[in-house]
Image (cartoon, rainbow, N blue to C red):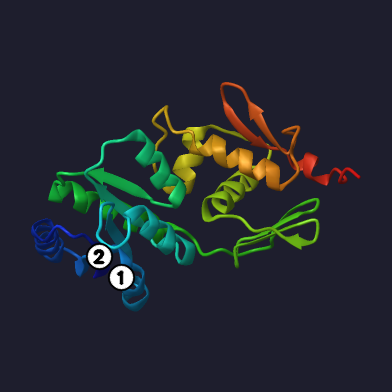
Amino acid sequence: MYRVLLVEDDLRLAQLVTEYLSSYEFSVELVTRGDTALASFKETMPDVVVLDLMLPGLDGMVVCRQIRDCSDVPILVVTARDDTYDEVSLLEQGADDFLNKPVQPRVLLARLRALMRRAHGKPEPEGAPLTFGALVITASDRTVTWRGQPCVLSNTEYKLLLVLAESAGHVLSRDALLKKMRGIEFDGLDRSIDNCISKLRRKFDDAESEKIKTVWGEGYLFSPSAWNAPALT
């Protein structure tokens, strides 16, 4: 059975979700406060997290970031909010999927099964590090070095850089990037990819956008040869 950490303060909904999922291949651990969610996560080590946004003690957006900073476990956010800004923020904080309330149990079950398939279908990182001039990406321990120095990246920045580097020399659309990173399709409004690209360019001295190129109307291209260029002095 898959272990689910359900972070939800609506006890009626929590009971409904728990009873429904427990009749399938999921066992459910309930947490009703945001400020105790991380401790419960570390104690139970669940296979997937179902997270409400509006929680007592600590906002669900913060809880999402806390969990993502220490784990790649799939996070499904359930929210009563209907705001595009919140959806973009959720993706940037590391959520894998989201559902709007009221929740249909069959839809929730289908989303959880899809997240489990993706999570268990990924191969373990192996092989030599990806090296492009002074850039070295080591997937086995999720480290990045730039010009011989460790480079600190957020979880989203690291995932985006890795996806781009693995497809070096090929243009990837925002839709393709989002699906490779989290399995969520681009809806035409999400600017999180653009914002993250800008952050990566600043961290890797790419003011001229030569290392990560914008291909207008198509997407972004990781240019292998540009990373070999010497640093400006």
Residue 184 picture location, percent across and down: 39, 42
Residue 81 picture location, percent across and down: 25, 41
Q: Secondary structure at mark 2?
A: loop
The structure residue drawn at horizontal position 32% and vertical position 55%, both measured from the top left corner, is: 60
Disc 2 marks which amino acid? Answer: Arg
Residue 190 picture location, percent across and down: 44, 33
- Marks 1 and 2, how far apart in space? 6 Å
Q: Secondary structure at mark 1?
A: helix
Q: What is the quadrant of the C terminus in the image?
A: top right
Disc 1 marks which amino acid? Answer: Thr
Q: Which mark is residue 36?
A: 1
The structure residue drawn at horizontal position 14% and vertical position 66%, both measured from the top left corner, is: 22
Q: Nearer the viewer, residue 66 or 175?
A: 66
Q: Which residue is mark 2?
A: 33
- Whether residue 68 sits left or right of residue 101 in the image: it is right
Kindly indicate whether the residue at mark 2 contacts the one at mark 1 (C-beta within 8 angstroms): yes
Name above or below for residue 187 compared with residue 231.
above
Residue 104 picture location, percent across and down: 14, 46
